[in-house]
Image: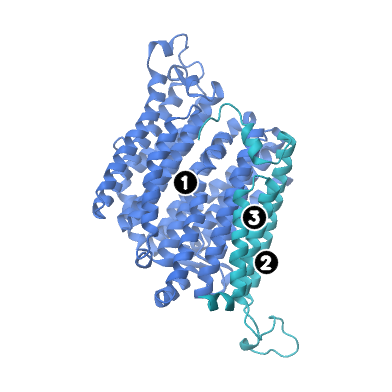
Chain colours: A cyan, B blue
Amino acid sequence: MMEGILNNYYETGAIILFGVGFVTLLMHNNLIKKIIGMNIMDTAVFLFFISKGYIEDRQAPIVRGVHKGVEGYINPIPTALMLTGIVVAVSMTAFALGLTVKIYEEYGTVDLGQIMKMRGDENDDS
Amino acid sequence: MIARNFPLLTIMILLICSFIMPIVKEAKTFKKLSIISMGASVVLNISTLIYIKYDGSFFYRVGHWDAPWGIELHIGMIEIIIGILFTLVASLVIWYSFYSVDTEIPKEKIRFYYLLINILIASLLGIVYSNDLFNSFVFIEVSTLASCGIVVIKDKKENIKATLKYLILSILGSGLFLMGIAFIYSITGNLNMTFIHNELAEIYIKYQNTILISLALFTVGLGVKSAMFPLHIWLPDAHSNAPSTSSALLSALVLKAFVFMLIKILLRVFSLEIVIQYRVLDLLLILGSIGMIFGSVLAIMQKNIKRVIAYSSVAQMGYIFYGIGLGNSLGLTISIFHIISHALTKSTLFLAVGSMMEQTGKNLSDLKGIGKEMPVTLGIFTIGAFSMVGIPILPGFISKWYFALATIDASKLIYLGVILLSSLLNAVYYFPIIINGYFGEENLKGKVFMSKNKPVKELLPVLILTVGIILVGIFNKGIINAINKSLI
């Protein structure tokens, strides 16, 4: 058990980071901290994915001079996928930050707990 | 042969038209562009349906790259039926929105509203058609952004708060979904659903824990997005604060695409034989049953009519999860049939309520006696509500009937009580609206007959949706057979 965790330290680190991000996203009331938590969570997934594509003693899949065959390079697909993932995460962050600015303009605070207290009278449910 | 290109073409037409909209000057032109692109997609989807009827389902290689390297679309009978449903409902909602958009959305933002609807429908079609997990993930993210966009477009205090709540929980869901892909990729080395399925059939005994983890991540991730019961907390706020056309789209289509994605993952990626060995289906069954009851109980406690209908969505999504959780092919078939029936019914209800709210107010007490002032609109609402409660011939009854049969098939007889109780609870909150609208001397006092009725041309799209509900109810046998055949 312990050996497995230590050997796959990339994955272990990624899962711990994922947990940190997840808890930050859910537990904090401050919107900026929530967005930071979301970024940590996304980064953890990127780390996990890229470590899956890495094979020891092999090079980045860029051909310099001679082509070394399939055995010479790491798996490029996870890296390529995560480029897309990063773009998606960036646009999500931008949108969330934009909404946070709007929230601050309307309510004067970025604390979700305070905002919920200010809610109107018509939304009275659990 | 050319019909094979149509599914990709529909997605492309919708996306390209949406990007043309910002550079068009006249308001009339981009409205036309929106309805024409959506109508064209309906036509293309129907011709694909005819092609599939004769030639069977097919895989489409995007950009002529072969399967494990390139992206594939899988178009079968179920996919195309759902595709037609999505585009048809969306075009009717767009048509309806021409008459209501000016009152609900700031003038300078109307153009972006149609842009977002086009992107939303294109990405939902992408989720339904795609046979590639990562491609689906990208479409899921696009649809999340677009659906947040059509909620926030009203630019009111409450909207922004509701959107932020929705966005944060959606991001959580997508994070879990991506992690699920990471786990499944690490043991199979593929992203194409068919290839993953073939790999898993060989190796699943060796990697039981990994499969369980990724299955749980997919279920919870998509469960957040499609409002599985304890994860539905974003739904009432987002759906009730959005403009009524947006609520119709969100409730009828967006939730359905994610739940369909879940069905696709369970069936196509893992296959039912593997899924049945884990307790994930039991979890879906229990959460679905709880959602069916508590969604209705929470709906009874609401005062705002749109929140009532939003909570009713939670209950109806519960039925769909319940059907998946039964774990037999009849249950899955009826879940997909319920996707169709609920999409038509809920969009009708939201549009009818939207036009009633324009004239009166948003609370239930404002709607007393509305049946005399707007008899046609309340009539449409009544048919939708009857379908939800489960009055025979209407699709809601058909799906409840078959859900009961599937429950007996799976020999889980206790759950029959859940279906019965949930139907009764549905009646508790829908019938008072109708009864107080049409009857009661006090309610009708001082109301002028037909005084607030809308002109027929504005009601036409909703009327067509109502006719659609009745037609789905009448031709249920054919639809259910078609779904059942292509499920296996």
Find numbered disc 2 in the image and state the secondary structure of the residue it sits on: helix
- Quarter-of-image position of residue B435: top left
Give the Cα separation between the discs numbered 3 and 2.
Answer: 17 Å
Subunit that carries the residue with mark 3: A
Give the Cα separation between the discs numbered 2 and 1.
Answer: 33 Å
The answer to whether A35 is drawn above or below residue B242 in the figure is below
Pointers 3 and 2 in contact (C-beta within 8 Å): no
Tag shown at residue A38: 3
Q: B80 or A43, which lies in front? A: A43
Query: Which residue is denoted by mark 2 in the rendering?
Result: A83
The answer to whether B227 is drawn above or below residue A76 in the figure is above
Residue pictured at 35% horizontal, 35% vertical: B389
Residue type at numbered disc 3: Met
Residue type at numbered disc 2: Leu
The answer to whether B140 is drawn above or below residue B304 in the figure is below
Give the Cα separation between the discs numbered 3 and 1.
Answer: 21 Å
Find numbered disc 1 in the image and state the secondary structure of the residue it sits on: helix
- Label 2 crowd bin: few (<14), some (14–19), many (20+), radius 10 Å: few
Q: Can see residue B26?
A: no
The answer to whether B172 is drawn above or below residue A3 in the figure is above
Residue pictured at 51% horizontal, 28% vertical: B304
